[in-house]
Image (spheres, rainbow, N blue to C red):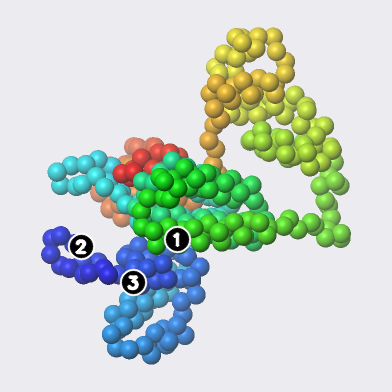
Amino acid sequence: MPFISKDWRSPGEEWVKTEEGWEKKRILECCHHPEHEGIDESRLEEKSKLPSESCEDNLALEQFVEKRRKTSDGAVQPHCQITIKSTREIAGFNGLSDALKRLDFRSAVHDIRRFNYTAKLLEMLMTQRLAMLPGCAQRVLFAMLEEVASHVCTSQQNIHTLRRLLGQLRATLDHACWGWPLGSSLLWERHLRSIDKVAAIASHIRIREPRDDAYPKLVDLPEECVREVLLRLDDHKDLESSGQAYGVMQRLVDEQRIWRELCRFHFTPLQLQHVTEGALAGCTDWQRIYHKLRRLFGLKEEYAEMIQLCRNCRCLFWKSIGHPCIADQDPEFQEKLEDVDKDSLHVPVPPHMFLKFFSL
């Protein structure tokens, strides 16, 4: 049970009881979870009929609903202020669970621009740091996984991503200490139920074929259009899968131009020169060159949208949403930034850099 204290050892923040447990009110206000969107006057009436000892919960819920009404036009901007450097006055500790909630990663799953970033973050946490996470972060992680499963089932997109995450999670649990993960047994029983739920969703996903009257279909597109589709794929696995799905695609995947453009996308001219003038000098098979480069240098991480770090206020935020920055509120601060390149103030944060802000 969380407590409220006004002494120097605790900030004395308000807490609200949700379906997932007790949450800090300031974090809950930054979230756009589906279960919070449905809170309305009818629920408030039901809460008001409860015994008098729940008055504090009713007040907190009313305040939360009022906050949602005021920001129903999209004014809420998910952001998280973090500590970059430890000093005597400021301890360098950032809570991962708080950051995931304040940045609203569960809603980011439903955005096609942010899905790959969220999936990569989930993959890194499950395969590399699952045993290091505290209980709160584990609950958020499995809630995000359930959200991914629900979104994939509804949209019928990125099914391979869901299955890969599920397979990696099961492989991680198979290597647990003495056959069982470390930590609370009750908490892990809840996690295992979540895994079974996600596995059931993944096993029941069936791709719905387009209706007979739907036009145009893939087979109706001219070869030039299909080639342009393949040129926009950034993974060799997607190219190989495309070739297995459609005969015309198989013929196009064998073209040298497809693999040449893929090489130019992932690798720099110096890296290309290193291979074409070295081990594969005189080779004209771009598919072979690509796989050689991939083994030597790895593939470039590319995301439609990434978390950004603001150098002014030390906030993490989504680029498309923005954040309430001190530079936008203080006129004196704005004068200092007149001669500064505004693009340099926001630093993109890849998933592996995002995790470095937390003590894992």
What's the residue at 62%, 60% (across, down)? 201
Q: Is residue 132 left or right of residue 262?
A: left
Residue furthest to the front = 178
Q: Are marks 1 and 3 in contact (CB under 8 Å)?
A: no
Label 2 crowd bin: few (<14), some (14–19), many (20+), radius 10 Å: few
Please determine whether, in this image, residue 325 is positioned above or below residue 261: below
First in residue order: circle 1 vs circle 3: 3
Q: Mark 3 = which residue?
A: 16
Mark 1 belongs to which amino acid? Glu
What's the residue at 51%, 48% (across, down)? 169
Residue 321 x %, y %: 46, 54
Quadrant of the frame with the C terminus = top left
Q: Quadrant of residue 97?
A: bottom left
- In this view, the mark in front (2 or 1): 1
Label 1 crowd bin: few (<14), some (14–19), many (20+), radius 10 Å: few
Quadrant of the frame with the N terminus = bottom left
Q: Are marks 2 and 1 in contact (CB under 8 Å)?
A: no
Mark 2 belongs to which amino acid? Pro
Q: Mark 2 = which residue?
A: 11
Q: Mark 1 = which residue?
A: 189
Quick one: 349 or 346, which is closer to the camera? 349
